[in-house]
Image (spheres, rainbow, N blue to C red):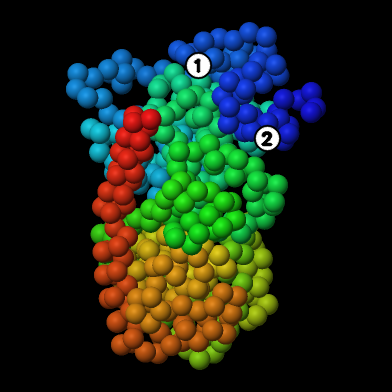
Amino acid sequence: MSNCPADWRYFGNLVIFYNNRNNFIRHLKQQLAPNYRLCGSFPIPHHRATTAALKTVPQLSASDSSSETAPPVRIFFLVDSLNTGGTETQAVELALRLDPLRYRITLGCLRQEGPLRARLEGSAVRVMEFHPRGGVKSPGGVYQLLRLAVFLCKQRFQIVHTHDLWSNLMGVPAARLAGTPVIISSRRDLSDSEWYSARNRAMLRLVQNLSTAILANSELVREDLLRFDSFSPEKVRVVYNGVDAGRFRVRVERERLFPGLKDLKLIVTVGNMHSDVKGHPWLIRAAVDVVRKVPSARFLLVGDGELRPAYERLALEVGVKEKVLFLGSRQDIPEVLSCCDVAVLSSTAEGLPNAVLEYLAAGLPTIATSVGGSLEIIRDGVTGLLVPPRDEQALGCAIVRLLEDQNLAATLARAGRQHVEETFGFDRLLANMTGLYTELMAQRIRG
């Protein structure tokens, strides 16, 4: 092992030693310092990074720390950022909707940035930042992990709930070190990104094994965890994402939002452009055949990312530059969807796509690729249409079919909206999550 306590091997040893807390503490003592400082019954290594961490741990006010009635359950959420992503939106909405008389929520971010920050302003949810400059396995990452562990211990959280990959890697070890009674980690994808090398997946497996429970957002994600990571079936729970269907029952004059497009057919897709996983290249190529058959068709691409210039070049190369409109990131998604005729998600992989839930809640006839959780949302030909991934011809044919068959489009839209309201509403999500929190806390009390 190198002299630097924050390299990858050191971070790996941190995780391995969490399986025996005494061994882990002994390891910290050997690596970081000869003396310990006590935080309640929790030993904190007396190291310059940890000393600095102690100084930066915020304190709760007296009004936060005492109550004449049964105190609310203290829950700490951790997310990567407050950008408008599916995972972040789910976490923020859950934090805002949990009963403040029963739960006191603190929401931690690895990066306190993004438009969702405004949603939390003025709410009972407290927001904290634990930014690992240089990444979770850098010196800055180890410093923030220790700072987070101290904070969790001092504030005596009863539940830590991490919501995504990066928050799993930092939050679960910190919660275990702090002695948090219930730790819930999450897996919301099918481990299909480049990050999931054999080495990284093994590391994540070690981390998530420290959890009390692992939360998946679809049955396919759960099956992936059981098959490839060998977690026990009892450990992996499924709670579907929720959508506020009422928020998408809006109507906006198209000419006001999109001047000059009043009499055109609008096909919308919502997804980030950080990689090809949302299927933008195949949708852009499908547009060629669609506009040839339906000249009034226009494609609205909502979202942004580093690949946007490449997608704009592709639209130019295949001859649909004037037919594909890049809208960038938007905060008025319900209004945008209300102006459209057909919605598409052409992903190559998915966990449980929030975009599809929002399309259906908006009453749009929806086309999705037959991957991941889309198969659990859409029943082909009943609540939407499914097409194979990476198949622009099939995608184009499905779009044309809905543009030309108004009766089919209307039938699918009605059935899709009803299905989402009955199965994926936020009331159901809240009931499932509060039930899970209660169950895991009760198990912990029983020992």
Left of 256 or right of it: where is 86?
Answer: right
User: Disc 2 designates what residue?
Assistant: 12
User: Disc 1 designates what residue?
Assistant: 42
Q: Quadrant of the N terminus?
A: top right
Q: Residues within 10 Å of mark 2 (few under 14, many from 20)?
A: some
Direction right: furthest residue: 2
Amino acid at dot 2: Gly
Q: Quadrant of the C terminus?
A: top left
Whichever of callouts 2 and 1 sits on the residue coming sooner in the sequence is: 2
Position in image of residue 269 (x %, y %): 47, 69
Left of 352 or right of it: where is 51?
Answer: right
Q: Is residue 30 visible to us here? A: yes
75 or 264: nearer the viewer: 75
Question: Which residue is rendered at x = 31% and y = 21% of the image?
Answer: 64
Amino acid at dot 1: Phe
How far apart, in angstroms, are the residues tagged by discs 2 and 1?
A: 22 Å
377 or 209: nearer the viewer: 209
Position in image of residue 313 (x %, y %): 66, 70
Relative to 373, say whether 146 is above or below: above
Q: Give the image quarter of residue 315.
A: bottom right
Direction front: furthest residue: 447
Position in image of residue 34 (x %, y %): 67, 9
Q: Is residue 144 visible to us here? A: no
133 or 163: nearer the viewer: 163
Question: Which residue is rendered at x = 54% and y = 84% of the image?
Answer: 394
Direction left: furthest residue: 69
Helix, strand or loop under label 2: helix
Position in image of residue 314 (x %, y %): 65, 73
426 or 255: nearer the viewer: 426
Relative to 61, say whether 447 is above or below: below
Question: Which residue is rendered at x = 26% and y = 64% of the image?
Answer: 422
